[in-house]
Image: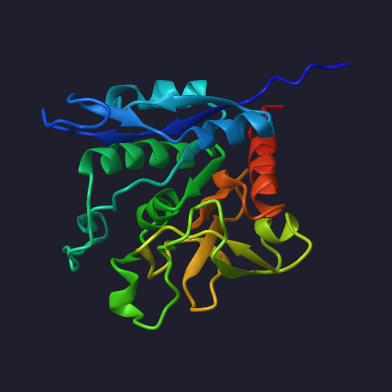
Amino acid sequence: MTNIKKPIIGITLDYIETSGKKHSYSTFPWYALRKNYVDTVLFAGGIPITIPYQFDTVAEILNIIDGLIIPGGDMDIYPGLYGQEIQSEKVMINKLRTDFDAALLKMALEKDIPFLGICYGMQLLNVLLGGTLIQHIPDKLPGSINHEQPNPKHIPSHEINIVKGTILSRLLATDRIQVNSSHHQAIDRLGKDIIVSAIAPDGIIEAIELERRKFVVGVEWHPEYLCSNPLDQNLFNEFIKCCIRS
């Protein structure tokens, strides 16, 4: 019987620059990642490692990992990356993180390394392929769903419709499911070769993917909470399966 090596999954980090100010964790800069990201990878059969910002070792990092996750964060992509100025006071950027994540993701796509983008990670995928973002959903769609749900993130808050023939459609027996929601931005113009795989009732794009790849999927919700059963667990299972090297 052949032993299958567990795939190594790289997960990028948030970066908090406190500039010497008193903080609940540290007065010095620190990286951050919620534990449920690594727990979900472990449960699905992967080995998670976190990736600090190392611009000069991007190629070496991608030689080590079998799959890449860019998670959400309490920040937005700086609009200059998609040819715009900041249009809303709600836009909060961390240029250092976005620049590193963009360098990592660009090369990962070139090497066809399986990728799962969550919330900000999905938005970054779209932007790198030439797409744009709605900088603040209520400004463009005043009557839209509240995509920054007030209830805890492990509780679903709105429905999505899954597009037939997509990766997501193969992971679920139905085309509708409730998901959680924690974003104020969304995809506006789609990037090159991106297809939509899920949409919210108000028209906001909730998931995207690239065809003819091992696995490139982005979702706006947070599947690491595993609250949209069985879709969230199936999503991680499929991602990990696609990361196993033959």
In depth, the one of 151 and 126 nearer the eye is: 151
Q: Is residue 159 left or right of residue 57?
A: right
Residue 197, quarter of picture = bottom right
Q: Furthest-left residue in view?
A: 20
Question: Height in image: 163 above or below 141?
Answer: above
Q: Position of residue 35 (x, y in %)?
A: 49, 32
Q: Quadrant of the C terminus?
A: top right
Q: Quadrant of the N terminus?
A: top right
Q: Position of residue 116 (x, y in %)?
A: 53, 44
In depth, the one of 201 and 169 nearer the eye is: 201
Point 54% across, 39% down: residue: 112
Point 35% across, 39% down: residue: 101
Q: Position of residue 76 (x, y in %)?
A: 29, 53
Question: Height in image: 153 above or below 131?
Answer: above
Question: Height in image: 141 above or below 99?
Answer: below
Q: Is residue 98 left or right of residue 226?
A: left
Count of numbered marks: 0
Point 11% across, 28% down: residue: 20
Q: How did the renderer colour the structure?
A: rainbow
Q: Position of residue 93 (x, y in %)?
A: 22, 50
Q: Is residue 222 left or right of residue 186?
A: right
In depth, the one of 212 and 105 nearer the eye is: 105
